[in-house]
Image: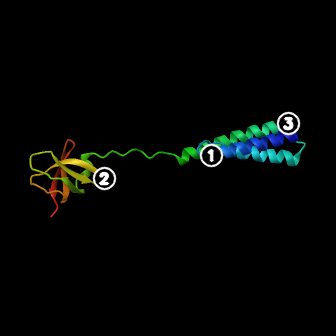
Amino acid sequence: MFWLGVALIIVGLLMLLAEVHAPGFFIAVPGTILLILGIAMLIIGDLDIMLASILMFLSAMGSIAFTLWFYRKLGEPEPPTTTTPDKLVGKIGIVTKKIEPGTLRGKVRVDSEIWSATSENEIEEGKKVVVKGAEGVHLIVEEVK
């Protein structure tokens, strides 16, 4: 029984070392459980091999379940957001490329995205504009005065 306790401690320590060198390997919790069981076996000494096996199995299953639950909660992705031109109506942007009436060569930055834009008037680069509408994926803007 002594050697089984020592073996559990060694395996637990090796698992913890592996987790330190390769984070995200998800073996820190089982390694800790093995380490605790090994120490318990050394302290108690005459723990029956069947009881020790059952305790190890239950501890491993519990730690696996907890680890999976924890990492799923930790890594829940946020739902993706899609920006459509219609959602930009009323927002303020900056002209990044000169806007000429009747063309779609002008560019504006609204929030963190750059959109092609048109306007009834010529608008120079660097001017503030407000989005008045959209045609497909192109914005219709007016200069903010």
Q: Which of the numbered marks, if any, corresponds to residue 21?
A: 1
Q: Earlier in the sequence, mark 3 or mark 2?
A: 3
Q: Residue at x 19, y 59 (%)?
A: 126
Q: Quadrant of the N terminus?
A: top right
Residue 94: x %, y % from top left = 22, 57
- The reply to whether discs 1 and 3 touch (Cβ–Cβ < 8 Å) is no
Q: Quadrant of residue 103?
A: top left
Q: Amino acid at mark 3?
A: Ile
Amino acid carrying mark 2 in the image: Ser
The residue tagged 3 is 49
The answer for how far apart the CA atoms under marks 2 and 1 are is 38 Å
Number of marks in the image? 3
Residue 41 falls left or right of residue 16 = right
Q: Residue at x 20, y 57 (%)?
A: 130
Residue behind mark 2: 112
Q: Nearer the viewer, mark 1 or mark 3?
A: 1
Badge 2 marks a residue whose secondary structure is loop
Q: Residue 138 at what x, y percent from top left?
A: 19, 45
Q: Quadrant of residue 24?
A: top right
Q: In the displayed image of the protein, which residue is found farthest to the front?
A: 21
Among numbered discs 1 and 3, the one appearing first in the sequence: 1
CA–CA distance between discs 3 and 2? Answer: 63 Å
Can you see residue 53? Answer: yes
